[in-house]
């Protein structure tokens, strides 16, 4: 019914703008002006920017020592593994029951100490294509494969020195697990045969970080205490393709003077598309590399990172691929964000391409040792040396909305309201 104009007080203004922008996206989608992915990307981005310590989800305390590693499977994004310094491994079901205000995530099964590993677990990872298998590595010198249904050991690889990390390709047709340890050689373990296929020599010290490219099943990145990050093609007899140089000099790609950091490299993460590689180090610097050219992009992430502990510590990338391990090209956060755990009990959130510190996630009472991303729910899980696993999820509040990047002309938004007979006043 047409009558005198209705006057409303648009308070708080960010809430009004949020609704206006959402309506704008919905209208553009319905009129066919934008593809549906635009609306989805905008909503996912808003949720990611609103992440904070979850008020509705907790994980039961199961480990009796530091939580060293976490991984969420990519098939259903439902089951999570945790490995601890107490040599135990736990399996959790993250699926939340309907109509539940407060959800306590409990362990479904476990591998007790001495039944599996003798010393602390340094890494856990799901087999990418089937939740019936997972991989663990440990400071007891071994990499083990496990049957998830029985929680029984399927095969063991002895690397003869403490293992810092391992990785399995998310796209490969092969079944190779790359294990890195205090030995300078990277060992490739074949799950099909239960034997080593070959080694990759090149590092001049312990190797602490390893990652497979999500774009090329035969490309591998590694980082070690010799301050280098190396890119490998495992099919070649001279497998090392390049040693990354932080100064972008025109020296030989394999020059012994090439260094990626000023101290030991402790973590590597490819972006979901495989176009970029992130490295973190004891020099407390985060570097973004072009995976095609091997050049340092020179993004400055500032002096905020605290990373001095001798343990693998990898950042998480949340981007258009939806997060590490998601299918390339999937709808996700835009601009891409980097979550970096730290020794100062915080998780830092950066704009990946601008290097700007966007947020500090506080809540852990100890050094944050590991993080993993659950893309279907826009949730982050973190482990720390206070024995706890914390859940970080979107928490909608005025402050969160204020921090969300909104592309909207305020004056045109008010004019749009007035055309519908509503006079909006900002208070």
Image: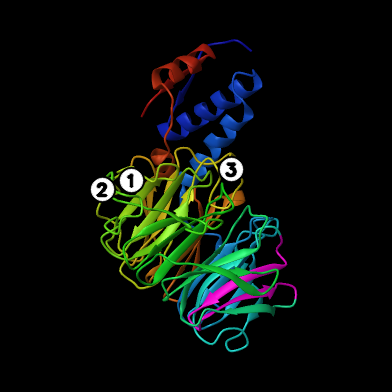
Report, in whole angstroms, how far the alpha carbon at label 3 lies from the one at label 2. Answer: 30 Å
Q: Is residue 1 above or below residue 58?
A: above
Query: Residue 174: x, y in percent?
Result: 66, 59
Q: Nearer the viewer, residue 21 or 4?
A: 21
Q: Which residue is farthest bottom?
A: 114
Image marks 3 and 2: residues in contact by CB distance under 8 Å? no
List the residue tagged with mark 3.
328
Which colouring convention does the figure follow?
rainbow
User: Which callout, 3 or 2, points at the residue further toward the start of the chain?
Assistant: 2
User: Which callout, 1 or 3, points at the residue further toward the start of the chain?
Assistant: 1
Asked if the magenta segment contains residue 139, the reply would be yes
| Among the 4 quarters of the image, the one containing residue 243 | bottom left
- Please give the name of the residue rendered at 63% of the width and 52% of the height, measured from the top-left corner: 171
Query: Residue 308: x, y in percent?
Result: 30, 69
Report, in whole angstroms, how far the alpha carbon at label 2 lies from the one at label 1. Answer: 7 Å
Report, in whole angstroms, how far the alpha carbon at label 1 lies from the one at label 3. Answer: 22 Å
- Could you tell me if residue 129 is visible in this image? yes
Q: Residues within 10 Å of mark 1 (few under 14, many from 20)?
A: many
List the residue tagged with mark 1.
296
- Please give the name of the residue rendered at 43% of the width and 16% of the height, measured from the top-left corner: 412
Q: Residues within 10 Å of mark 2 (few under 14, many from 20)?
A: few
**157 sits to left or right of 357:** right
Image marks 2 and 1: residues in contact by CB distance under 8 Å? yes
- Please give the name of the residue rendered at 35% of the width and 52% of the height, measured from the top-left corner: 244
Q: Is residue 132 above or below residue 377?
A: below
Which residues lie in the magenta part? 130-149
Image marks 1 and 3: residues in contact by CB distance under 8 Å? no
**SS under mark 2:** loop
| Among the 4 quarters of the image, the one containing residue 59 | bottom right
List the residue tagged with mark 2.
247
Between label 3 and label 2, give the one nearer the viewer: 2
**SS under mark 1:** loop
């Amino acid at each position: 019914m047409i009558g005198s104009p209705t006057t409303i007080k648009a308070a708080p203004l960010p809430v009004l703008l949020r609704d206006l922008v959402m309506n704008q996206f919905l209208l553009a989608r319905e009129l066919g002006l934008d593809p549906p992915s635009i609306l989805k990307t905008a909503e996912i981005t808003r949720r990611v920017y609103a992440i904070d310590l979850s008020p509705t989800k907790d994980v039961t305390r199961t480990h009796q020592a530091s939580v060293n590693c976490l991984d969420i499977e990519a098939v259903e994004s439902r089951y999570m593994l945790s490995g601890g310094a107490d040599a135990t491994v736990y399996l959790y079901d993250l699926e939340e029951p309907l109509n539940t205000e407060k959800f306590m995530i409990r362990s479904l099964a476990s591998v007790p100490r001495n039944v599996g590993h003798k010393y602390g677990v340094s890494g856990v990872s799901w087999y990418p294509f089937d939740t019936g298998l997972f991989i663990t590595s440990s400071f007891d010198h071994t990499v083990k494969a496990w049957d998830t249904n029985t929680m029984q050991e399927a095969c063991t690889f002895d690397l003869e020195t403490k293992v810092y990390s391992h990785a399995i390709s998310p796209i490969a047709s092969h079944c190779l697990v790359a294990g890195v340890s205090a030995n300078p050689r990277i060992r490739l373990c074949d799950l099909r045969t239960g034997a080593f296929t070959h080694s990759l020599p090149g590092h001049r010290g312990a190797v602490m970080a390893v990652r497979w490219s999500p774009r090329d099943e035969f490309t591998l990145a590694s980082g070690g205490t010799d301050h280098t990050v190396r890119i490998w093609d495992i099919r070649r007899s001279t497998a090392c393709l390049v040693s990354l140089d932080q100064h972008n000099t025109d020296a030989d790609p394999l020059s012994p003077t090439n260094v990626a950091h000023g101290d030991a490299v402790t973590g590597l993460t490819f972006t979901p598309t495989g176009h970029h590689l992130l490295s973190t180090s004891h020099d407390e610097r985060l570097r973004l590399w072009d995976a095609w050219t091997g050049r340092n992009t020179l993004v400055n992430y500032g002096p905020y990172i605290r990373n001095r502990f001798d343990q693998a510590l990898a950042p998480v990338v949340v981007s258009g691929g939806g997060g590490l391990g998601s299918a390339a090209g999937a709808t996700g956060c835009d601009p891409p964000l980097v979550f970096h755990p730290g020794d100062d009990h915080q998780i830092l959130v950066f704009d990946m391409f601008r290097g700007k510190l966007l947020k500090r996630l506080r809540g852990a009472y100890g050094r944050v040792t590991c993080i993993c991303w659950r893309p279907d729910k826009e949730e982050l899980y973190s482990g720390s040396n206070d024995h706890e696993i914390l859940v970080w999820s979107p928490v909608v509040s005025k402050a969160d909305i204020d921090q969300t990047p909104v592309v909207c002309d305020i004056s045109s938004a008010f004019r749009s309201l007035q055309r519908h007979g509503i006079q909006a006043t900002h208070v």
